[in-house]
Image: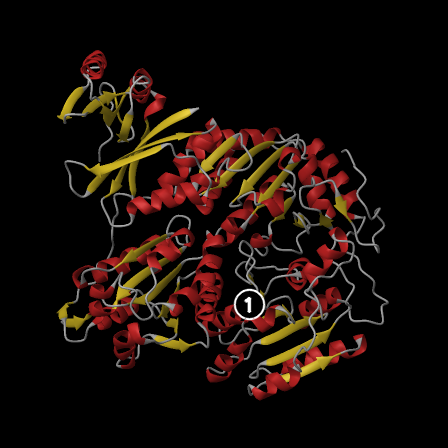
Amino acid sequence: MRHIISILIENEAGALSRVAGLFSARGYNIESLTVAPTEDPSLSRMTIVTTGTERIVEQIIKQLNKLIDVVKLLELTDGPHIEREMMLIKVKASTMAQREDVKRLADIFRGNIIDVSPTIFTIELTGSGDKLDSFIDSLAEHKILETVRSGASGIARGDKCLHV
Amino acid sequence: MELSGGEILIRCLKDEGVDYLFGYPGGAVLHIYDALYQQEDVNHILVRHEQAATHAADGYARATGKPGVVLVTSGPGATNAVTGIATAFMDSIPMVVITGQVPSANIGSDAFQEVDSVGITRPCVKHNFLVKDINKLAETVKKAFYVATTGRPGPVVIDVPKDITDPAIKIPYNYPDKVTMRSYQPTMKGHTGQIKRAIELLLTAKKPMIYTGGGVVLGNASDELRTFVRQLGYPVTTTLMGLGSFPASDPQFLGMLGMHGTYEANMAMHGCDVLIAIGARFDDRVTGKIAEFCPDAEIIHIDIDPSSISKTIVVDVPIVGDVATVLQEMNHLLKTSKKQPQKKAVEAWWQTINSWRAKNCMTYDHHSDKIKPQAAIELLHEITNGDAYVTSDVGQHQMWAAQYYGFEKPNRWINSGGLGTMGFGLPAAMGVQLAFPDETVVCVTGEGSIQMCIQELSTCLQYGLPIKIIALNNRYLGMVRQWQEFFYENRYSHSYMESLPDFVKLTESYGHVGMRVERPEDLKPMMEKAFAMKDRLVFMDIVTDQAENVYPMIMAGKAHNEMHMSPNCELPQSPERELS
């Protein structure tokens, strides 16, 4: 089962390695991890996507809470939430037909072409992980030169907030 | 008052009430040692190896309940300390370890004696800090002590680059009275609703069992536990780490449980219908086969660390909180409760337990012409009136000490339970003896373990520590040999040590008293003689029966009712499933 855990953590050197180290030391799965400072520069917000049984995820949450640098955390998959991931993807588009088809697919997926060269389109696309996967699938006829994915970020819907 | 970083560090330790600092100097901590030289409040104990500094501080902490403090240099100083830090971490011992670091500007440059101490220690500390600014030094020390000693205790490392302690840079000194950390607020008080549920469940029990661990010792909850156990009239067992938290001579005590626990304790675990775990963490050496652990029991678990609850064994009534606080509340509820325990059923349960007890699982051969290690420990109990502080190393001797000493008081049994660190015993005994100079301190060890930190005999001479070393010398790495006998068809691969030193001469060369005992009839007079030398360290090299094994034994991965018994016991030696 896939779970998304959102963490507020002290923005200290080494805080990220404490979290990453915990996952490797205890053999927990980690699908993606994103982290950046929040509006309060002393805090970072981290989103971890992990898989495991309910029991394992309960242990992961307890172990994360035990880290001294972790201020608060929330399991987003416990309730309604929004999940977004950004992808930058470079696709070969040298012929007219290719350029038109890639442009059309990008439009369907509401992606933006953010860089163009005579033979290449670079597309920016945001959405759930599934949507990004589908976009990659839809480009099967084309040559993908490079993909960069940010990993998922998430936030709870409605009134529920993760803050200090 | 303006102080340099080195002076601030030492002054913080003084203000924190630290009386002993265990350490070893080196380049990165020279400024700190210079500050240490110019004061008299904090006593520095110079060990012979950094591992011993951490074990000594650890022993001090286990015996006193106060944090142990260590100072070592960068690089090899820090890496040598890691074994001791991990030992303390596994057993939740409060400790503050200050490691020197190369100057800030050199960090990351592969400088002389540089290691990433924060990185290396991260998985085996409760928390660690790298000090980057002298203005944060005092606050960091305060935080380190706060984190180490509160909640579930543990070791905390403070890595201090050399430039931070530069004597040329002085700042006003201000040690905070207290710190609060938004990210760290341990839960002390248990959830009242859960406590009530637990009491209700306990009072419905027909075959109850109380299983307690090191948390009772660490949480200073022995008195509360005694009241709790007496009020209920239920049987109680402790883990290796919990020995002494309940008096061994009490009729309600069934002895230790687990891999080398008693028949009655393990059978009672297997047969119970309500189990309450108090400050214990369901370690694999305790649970045996998880799938068959307490198959019929509803389980209550009190622990200060939420991550200990339902980690390996899923429990029915979890209570997160300080053991003493929760037990106080439980004792109060029991006292005022209208309901009573199921008297008749519990009486029948005791009858069953007493029939197990009558099998006398701990008996051994009393007529051997060789010295039996069990007899040596029983004699030790007799000669020390069961009132000594006993440290141990790791292996068969550790189990025999745990099984046969009979601890009546908490904080007196000091061993590396979680990590199982050979070499722990002697330095730990140094820490205990320094804390309690007038008490009898014994290190029970083997000829294998003692050689892992034997150099500390020199430290013992320097500080006049009259430790009594009881070395059960069977010329084997006994526990390894035992497993090789059981599981590897007697292929004793490298568990036999040739060329053992003459321990008597070795001890004498370190300036202490050495004795060798080879015959059972000499054991008592020699041990009496050793303990009569109150102000001398005595090393008793006791030549014991090589073939002796630790019994009972639950083989790894087996259930509590599948014990192997001693051939001297009236129970069948190999396990017959007893379904109770």
Residue B266 appearing in the image: yes
> Viewed as shown, does residue B22 lie left or right of A163?
right
| Relative depth, front residue between B140 and B193 | B140
Q: Quadrant for the N terminus of chain A, please.
A: top left
Residue that carries the numbered disc 1 in the rendered image: B423
Residue A80 appearing in the image: no
| Relative depth, front residue between B577 and B123 | B123
Q: Quadrant for the C terminus of chain A, please.
A: top left
Q: Position of residue B349 (x, y in %)?
A: 72, 36
Q: How many marks?
A: 1
> Viewed as shown, does residue B421 lie left or right of B357?
left
- Within the image, what quadrant is residue A128 found in? top left
For label 1, count other residues whose C-alpha is less than 10 Å away and answer few (under 14), some (14-19) or many (20+). many
Amino acid found under the numbered disc labelled 1: Gly
Picture layout, residue B447 above or below residue B574: below
Chain at numbered mark 1: B
